[in-house]
């Protein structure tokens, strides 16, 4: 069940039950998730919540394809040429919860958006794009189980004198000064923040499984549990980003999911673990003949990797991440090796899976998952053959096709004859136009380093 919709009376009952249990609620945030994984919507007084649950709330339907600042570029004629019409956002059952980091008692609810005239889903909604790919998988008898891992840095809310950012000082401590990969001491130092994240996730029903200190100074990773519903997994991933940032702000810090916030530190990745199950829920990769299926899935991901790269690395900063350690720059795969694009962890039976390690944490989870599952589907339905697994370090040097430039990646995505089998060419063009507009706005000014080089 991918739309999670119920009849309006059921939704209204859901709201009334929530308000009875949380009578102090003053506001409700109603939002959708855009191509960047950001939440866009409205904060409404609680007195208007019944109207929201009866008939929805209207706001710009072009918000789905806005850039990282929330600004539009008339991509596909949406937002300017069409007069920027509203869509109707309606709550999704099961997503209503408290916002535990808010200083004022507030609720939030994830919405889906429909056309105000015909009541059909807005086609550029990333949830709609992902649902279409999931439906293709289901029609082929392929049932993915997925999990998302997100890396981020805790940073100071104040910019440096040069306008940059720096690692945050944790409550009662100075800023971290050394890398502490997998350090429990580093987790203890950030325990107040991480405990609040875990508790907020419990309140919001997000299945956080573990939190670890990562390679970077002040870098952490939060893992979500495996789910047999990829749409729900991506909803939870986007909501977790909102949660982490909200908790950080409530503690006078910020959190950044930029792909490469510090040039001398590791980047932030969005790693997606994927397996497939049979009708009884048993892992097909771990069963008899599973190794053949696993390699076919990897082969499909290899085939669509560079065509999908503009989704995995969606902005100017994203490309910087591929200059770092343990970040893939080729189609290579391997067993128990973090330097490749497609890692098969040292797990067997029900835990057998592929870890797709290409995307940055700045990538929208729904589009990223759509591209990952498109690769999986392509490989399995065409019984493709993967390359041989590599040994040793594979993330240096890359290969000749690696799209090490955003404009190159966008051009390749639009020209793809494979990706459009799973994601419409019309949407890919709209996405590409939005990202080109964002890029051109970014480079219209002079970077400070240019004065050092060229004055």
Image (tube, rainbow, N blue to C red):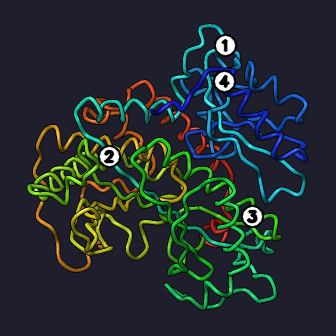
Circle 2 residue: 144
Circle nearer the N terminus (3, 1): 1
Which residue is located at x 52 percent, y 33 percent? 433
Q: In this figure, what is the number of numbered marks? A: 4
Above or below 64: residue 301: below
Determine whether the residue tagged by mark 2 lies in a helix, strand or loop: strand
Circle nearer the N terminus (2, 1): 1
Determine whether the residue tagged by mark 1 lies in a helix, strand or loop: loop
Q: Mark 4 near mark 3, Cβ–Cβ under 8 Å?
A: no
Circle 3 residue: 247
Above or below 105: residue 416: above
Determine whether the residue tagged by mark 3 lies in a helix, strand or loop: helix
Q: Nearer the viewer, mark 2 or mark 1?
A: 2
On screen, residue 455 versus residue 346, left or right, reads right
Q: Nearer the viewer, mark 4 or mark 2?
A: 2
Above or below 336: residue 431: above
């Amino acid at each position: 069940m991918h739309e999670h919709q119920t009849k309006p009376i059921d939704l209204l009952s859901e709201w009334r039950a929530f308000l009875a249990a949380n009578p102090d609620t003053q506001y409700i945030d109603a939002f959708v998730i855009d191509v960047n994984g950001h939440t866009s919507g409205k904060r409404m007084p609680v007195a208007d919540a019944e109207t929201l649950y009866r008939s929805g709330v209207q706001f710009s339907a072009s918000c789905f394809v806005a850039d990282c600042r929330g600004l539009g570029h008339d991509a596909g004629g949406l937002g300017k040429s069409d007069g920027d019409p509203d869509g109707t956002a309606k709550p999704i059952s099961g997503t209503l919860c408290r916002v535990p980091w808010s200083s004022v008692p507030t609720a939030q609810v994830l919405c889906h958006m429909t056309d105000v005239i015909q009541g059909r889903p807005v086609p550029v909604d990333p949830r709609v794009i992902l649902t279409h790919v999931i439906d293709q998988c289901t029609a082929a008898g392929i049932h993915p189980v997925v999990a998302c891992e997100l890396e981020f840095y805790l940073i100071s809310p104040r910019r440096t004198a040069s306008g940059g950012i720096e690692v945050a000082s944790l409550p009662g401590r100075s800023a971290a000064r050394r890398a502490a990969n997998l350090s429990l001491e580093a987790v203890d130092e950030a325990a107040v923040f991480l405990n609040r994240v875990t508790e907020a996730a419990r309140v919001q029903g997000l299945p956080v499984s573990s939190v670890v200190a990562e390679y970077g100074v002040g870098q952490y990773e939060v893992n979500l549990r495996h789910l047999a519903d990829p749409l729900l997994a991506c909803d939870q991933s986007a909501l977790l980003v909102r949660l982490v940032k909200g908790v950080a702000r409530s503690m006078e810090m910020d959190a950044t999911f930029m792909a490469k916030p510090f040039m001398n530190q590791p980047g932030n990745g969005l790693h997606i673990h994927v397996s497939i199950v049979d009708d009884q829920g048993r892992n097909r990769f771990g069963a008899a003949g599973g190794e053949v299926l696993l390699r076919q899935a990897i082969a499909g991901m290899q085939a669509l990797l560079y065509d999908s790269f503009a989704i995995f690395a969606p902005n100017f900063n994203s490309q910087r991440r591929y200059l770092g350690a343990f970040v893939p720059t080729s189609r290579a795969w391997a067993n128990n090796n973090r330097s490749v694009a497609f890692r098969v962890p040292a797990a067997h039976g029900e835990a057998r899976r592929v870890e797709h390690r290409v995307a940055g944490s700045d990538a929208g989870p729904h589009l990223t998952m759509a591209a990952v599952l498109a690769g999986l589907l392509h490989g399995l339905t065409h019984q493709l053959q993967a390359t041989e697994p590599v040994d040793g370090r594979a993330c240096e040097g890359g290969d000749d096709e690696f799209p090490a430039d955003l404009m190159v990646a966008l051009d390749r995505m639009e020209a793809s004859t494979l990706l459009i089998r799973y994601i419409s060419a019309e949407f890919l063009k709209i996405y590409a136009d939005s990202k080109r507009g964002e890029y051109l706005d970014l480079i219209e000014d002079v970077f400070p380093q240019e004065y050092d080089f060229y004055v």
